Amino acid sequence: MENLRELDKRHFIHPTSSIQQQQENGPKVIMEKGEGIYLYDKSDNAYIDAMSSLWNVNIGHGRVELADAAAEQMKKLAFSSAFSTFSHEPAIKLAEKIASISPANLNAVFFTSGGSEANDSAIKLVRHYWKIQGQPERQTIISLKRGYHGVAAASTSATGIPQFWGMAGHMMTGFTHAETPYGSSTDSAIASLRETIETEGAENVAAFLVEPVQGAGGVLIPPKDYLEKVRQVCDAYGILLIADEIITGFGRTGKMFAVENYGVQPDLLTFAKGVTSGYIPLGGVLVSDPIHEVLKEMSEGTLFHGFTYSGHPTAAAVALKNIEILEQEGLVENSREMGEALLQGFQNIKEKLNIVGNVRTMGLLGAVELVRNPGTNERFTSDQKVAPKVIDALHQRGVICRPVTYDNTDIICFAPPIIINKVQINTLVDKLYDAIHAVEKELGQ
Ligand code: PLP
């Protein structure tokens, strides 16, 4: 094990990490196996994976059916191109399946290997769409502050967390950000969207890209009427609406797709993560029938956009099996019911403890905010590192969660596998209570 640690320090550049800390300390945990909602490290310590790893292992760990689906497909046809006039059965069947379970008019799919590629593809597709329509000046992508859309060139720029732009030196041109409906009303967030459109000039705006629930921003669930009003604004200005469902898709929010919670039809929808429950990389963009029709009429004839692994047959076979399990085991329904149980647990904790502010869930996407004074919502200072301390306390109790401390917030995020049951929810809530209680004592609150 020490040897692995040393090799990691020497050779492995970890994503989203402090490379310096990594060099000094090496990895905190080296995972060995997973089963259900649990991960086990090399010393066989068990952890509740309360984040489904990176919001993606929706059906939980260790499902042999997915391994079998991959093995069968690999033995038959591990890979073959889907470029141009070539095709294969797994990708065809998956495209049809995703079209059938997604909102009504989204019926055509462009596949990628992950979420960042999906958002970059969506952005290129909408710009291309406007060009074909004779409006090439429609380039601007509006997204939300605190939004996260990935780390490829365009998706980094669409991301509304400025730290991410630094890595590229700057944001690409053609991107701007409106206010997020967090701690404010629908009306003020909608006013900000309108103002952003007016400032850019509606004739220059290609699309508004939005997560139905912001994940990395801190599980920010917008007011019920926000997305509906967004749709109205987009329609009024003739702007396309792209829903980033990379976290929220495939049952995470108690519906197959989160836009169903709001009764809103986007023009494009990006997905990744839960489509394969993370067992193999896959993502994509769903486009509406009218957009598909326009793309068919492309003036240049060829879509000069495609990845080697667009529609990878093995990934598609795994996704098909994953969706079959979601449906057969009623996991979307379970996500809704267990999300309510989790919320109840959060509310009980809030009543008993002194530093718990807003608590929320939508399906099994949830958050607990920690504040100095729940009455006034006064926050802690960032140097108190309250959320990281709670995350450490949870880790010691065998729970893996994620803090969001951006912009001086202390948010603990939850996205457990959607197979979780009531007993496991209670265990998770008990451990959360203990962890926050321990930190409260340390803070003298
Ligand atoms: N969009 C959202 C909402 C995400 O949460 C993420 C990843 O966390 C992405 C896009 C990027 O996806 P990927 O990391 O697969 O490139």
Image: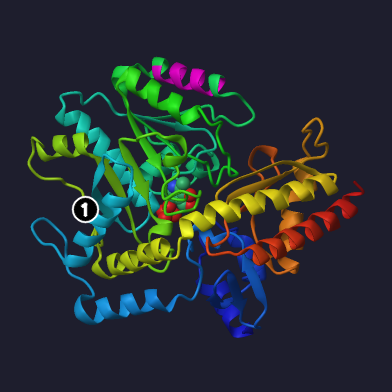
Place residue 263 in its image quadrant: top left
Residue 385 visible in the displayed image: no
| Residue at image coords 31%, 80% | 71
The residue indicated by pointer 1 is 306
Is residue 263 rendered to the left or right of residue 81?
Answer: right
Is residue 42 rendered to the left or right of residue 286?
Answer: right
Residue range highlighted in magenta: 188-197
Seen from the viewer's position, the closer of residues 408 and 273 is 273
| Residue at image coords 50%, 37% | 160
Residue 63: x %, y % from top left: 45, 75
Q: Residues within 10 Å of mark 1 (few under 14, many from 20)?
A: some
Residue 194: x %, y % from top left: 44, 18
- The amino acid on which the numbered mark 1 sits, given as a three-letter code, is Gly
> What secondary structure is the magenta-colored segment mainly?
helix
Seen from the viewer's position, the closer of residues 428 and 369 is 428
| Residue at image coords 36%, 37% | 242
Residue 336 visible in the displayed image: yes
Quadrant containing the N terminus in the rendered view: bottom right
Residue 360: x %, y % from top left: 64, 43
| Residue at image coords 38%, 58% | 275
Where 385 falls versus 320 (above or below)?
above
Where 77 falls versus 299 (above or below)?
below
Residue 171 inside the magenta-drawn segment: no
